[in-house]
Amino acid sequence: MLSEQDNELLTRVGPGTPMGDLLRRYWTPALLVSEVPTPDSDPVRVRLLGEDLVAFRDTNGQVGLVGENCPHRGASLYFGRNEECGLRCPYHGWKFDASGACVDMPSEPPTSVFKDKVQLKSYPTHESGGIVWTYMGPAEKMTPFRDFGTETLAPEHVSATKLHTTCNWVQAMEGNLDTSHISWLHQFNGVKDIQDDGSDKPGYPSNPMSWKFWAHDRAPRLEVEDTWYGFKYVGIRTTPNGFTHVRMSAFCYPYHTVIATVPFGCRQGLFVPIDDENCWRYSFTSRNVENPQGIGGANLFSVAPFKFGRAEVNGNGIIPREYTAENDYGIDRDEQRHRTFSGVAEFVSQDLMVTESMGPIYDRTQERLGTSDKALIRMRRLLIAAAKKVAEGGEPPAVDPDLDYRSIRSAEKILEEGEDWRILGTNDDPLVQEMDVDGIPASTPTTRS
């Protein structure tokens, strides 16, 4: 459990809070590129870290992220006119460029220099991987953008989505870092009918067989290792044939997760605070990885009875919510009794059901943690320590742009005798050297000629 003080520190992200000050030292997703698609397109409301902002793409294609309220009389600039390289307030015509400078003040005399003294709050932006990122911390502390691989990603491989979640960001992220719940929340009766395809042996299992392993050993043993970017950890299970199966996931400061995938994964899931009680679940591809051998076989969800929400429904990467607290996440009690463990039809909504039902901010003084919660405990301790360090004048971890953020991967495998799970998904992993050359620095040898 956490003390009341540490729970407050962990979850509160507004301006001037210790955690809010920590998060503002990182480049943060503000919105999807698709939300401001073209020059002079419609402005977009953005609520981020408890601040109300407006984003717009100006005539030259630059994305501005500015305070929502006009500094004149406070009217919302969401209703402004996006025209000729600026956002013009509908109330008196004051106009601001992407940097927040007032470039026109037609309600004042032509001889007035008042506009030169007016500055709208604004934050710098950077587009990468289908996301508009922003830096909200002190200007003198701003570091270059961290490249997880998206800076050189070909346009045809760019894929980014976001999903609104009605609970605190840490609460939502804890669901992603909990490897034991897949043996319960996401299970279904048909797992026992999945045919043994021969991949229950050292090496990479098929995705369908992974379901059987998760159901077979429902109390995984956890091992956690600290890294320069945060930590990585495995859930260790014994397969029906008696082999050691591991799911390795990674956490990167301050809200990045890379969840176990056969054979390894590079897609990141981010839990970005809207405010203390809401967050966006961002997901983006960091690069294209070739899998010519077809390792893993059929898609993970090809054998599951679950629906899977798709961003293509809206066409702009924002995943709609069909199942919410208002309709009890569509729980079907008959399904729960006879077919699926949760009774909730849509896969991600199963996670949302449990994390949102804890309340907007869970009181962690009431929880009782077990050995399967090691990764959550580590994440909390690292974030709390980092926030306290920054509050004392120190620097946040993992902001150096020269660090190899492309090397952060997940993995899933049945281990060979004596094989160390810590090598999986790293630049030293032979399969990574074969399949993810773009993610390995040129100084690292690979198996390709």
Image (tube, rainbow, N blue to C red):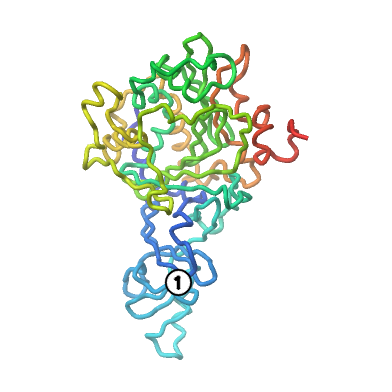
Q: Which residue is at the far top?
A: 242
- Identity of the residue drawn at 35% across and 46% down: 164
Q: Which quadrant of the figure contains the N terminus?
A: top left
Q: Is residue 10 visible?
A: no
- State left or right for residue 10 relative to residue 409: left
- State left or right for residue 396 relative to residue 418: left
Query: Which of 218/34 is in front?
Result: 34
Q: Residues within 10 Å of mark 1 (few under 14, many from 20)?
A: some
What residue type is disc 1 on?
Gln
313 over 91 or under it: above or below: above
Image coordinates of residue 414 in percent, x first then y, are: 55, 18
- Identity of the residue drawn at 51% across and 35% down: 258
Q: Is residue 401 visible?
A: yes
Q: Which quadrant of the figure contains the C terminus?
A: top right
Q: Which residue is at the far right?
A: 449
Image coordinates of residue 279 in percent, x first then y, are: 37, 46
Q: Secondary structure at mark 1?
A: loop
Image coordinates of residue 174 in percent, x first then y, are: 40, 33
- State left or right for residue 400 relative to residue 59: right
Query: Which of 345/135 is in front?
Result: 345
Q: Quadrant of residue 94?
A: bottom left
Total marks shown come to 1
Query: Which of 385/14 is in front?
Result: 14
Q: Quadrant of residue 71?
A: bottom left
Image coordinates of residue 336 in percent, x first then y, are: 25, 25
152 over 70 or under it: above or below: above
The residue singled out by tag 1 in the image is: 119
